[in-house]
Image: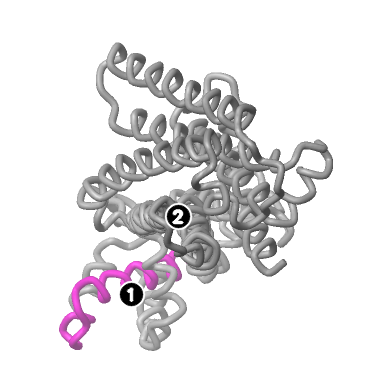
Amino acid sequence: MLMSYSFWLIAVVLGVGACYKLPAIVRVGGNPLARQVGGLLILATAVFFFAAPTVIAKMNDLTGIVNFSAPWVYSLITLFSASCLLLIIKWRGGDEVSIRRATWWVYGSYGTLVLGLWLCFSMGDHHVERVRDLDTFYATTPWMREMILLYLAAQTSAALVTSALLWSWERTVRRTGWLHTGVVLLTVGYALNIVFNALKLTAVIARWNGHNLDYLSTNVAPLIAFLVGLLISLGFVVPHTGNRVSQYVAARREYQALAPLARTLQHVPTASAPVFLGRTAPLRLRLTHRRTFVRDALRHLYPFMNTELHEKTVQGLIAEGKKPHRAQALADAAAISAAVERIHAGGSPVPGQPHIDLSNPVVISRALRRLPSLHAVRRTSSTESLTS
């Protein structure tokens, strides 16, 4: 039962990844590569769900055919292997003729293998139900032996090709963040898949030679299969989920970083009508609104900023030991604060002043909140600005 729970856990993780790709699968005219990944995840989910010993026994009972689950699960594994190869073909790219030829070769060869699995099963003697050790129990049984070898050969060849391509691809995606993490997980997962097949094949060959290494297939291989499923599922899920989380965290940080500047500008008139968004509104929508509001308010403030005073403030702060970029941000914040106070006091625009570069509002907003010397600078610049 523990093995069933382990396999179901992997199926759930893979299913989550498939749900992420579901829109790409059903979308007409969508990205073919995304559809290929989605199809692969669906097949992988099915493999781990139906390979659970509890489900194997239930399938045999429902169909009334002893060991019916064997060719069914082997067929799913073979189709999953074919899906891996098709994904590799899409990733590798090339001219349309070569891609189409390789795709049809995979369809033809692996489709034939699936038919061969069912043909061997129908011709073999499989009257004794085996839920966990069918591979070794029937390793010397005519036709059942061939069925086992067919699925192992299909899975091993696909795992070898996929591992080789992922290994070569890993070098090209270094320093790409979550994508590189996903490729590394997939590389290790498919490499362990080769180990899984080697263990199964070793146990089968041992039976051919009169030895008993069944524990490799019955006890060790399922543990490797669990790791394979976990790594492959994470390899597909982590890049997508990681990017989503990173984007959310970055948006949250920017939204919070802009808060001091937005509060400073909240009473500055803008060209657009004010829009009030509650905390329940999507973060991306609130961030877009805050960016737009800050940009429009700063555009309205430009005529009220004293460029000459701004430059003097920058030089004064540098003379006090501030680094140039910090002095610039502090002076920008002081100029904005002074311009806001000038508007509130009913002051007129400063004539003949070039616009101050305020292209990094996040840095300016952080200066408003974090730099302790800003208040003194703001008071000085405000007084001089109002009297200029």
- Quarter of the figure with the C terminus: bottom left
Viewer-side residue, 114 vs 332: 114
Separation of residues labelled 2 and 1 (CA atoms) = 78 Å
Question: Which comes before the other along the chain, label 2 or label 1?
Answer: 2
Above or below 364: residue 273: above
Q: Quadrant of residue 184?
A: bottom left
Viewer-side residue, 141 vs 39: 141
Viewer-side residue, 105 vs 212: 212
Residue placed under numbered mark 1 in the picture? 330
SS category of the residue bearing label 2: helix
Colour logic: one colour
Q: Which residues are magenta?
A: 316-342
Viewer-side residue, 217 vs 112: 217
Q: Residue at x 29, y 53 (%)?
A: 353
Counting other residues with Cα less than 10 Å from the Cα at mark 1, is it few (<14), some (14-19), or many (20 or more)?
many
- Quarter of the figure with the N terminus: bottom right
Q: Residue 160 in the image: state x and y as whole percent.
A: 31, 44
From the image, give the main secondary structure of the stretch colored magenta.
Answer: helix
Res 216 seen here: yes
Q: Residue 214 in the image: state x and y as whole percent.
A: 50, 62
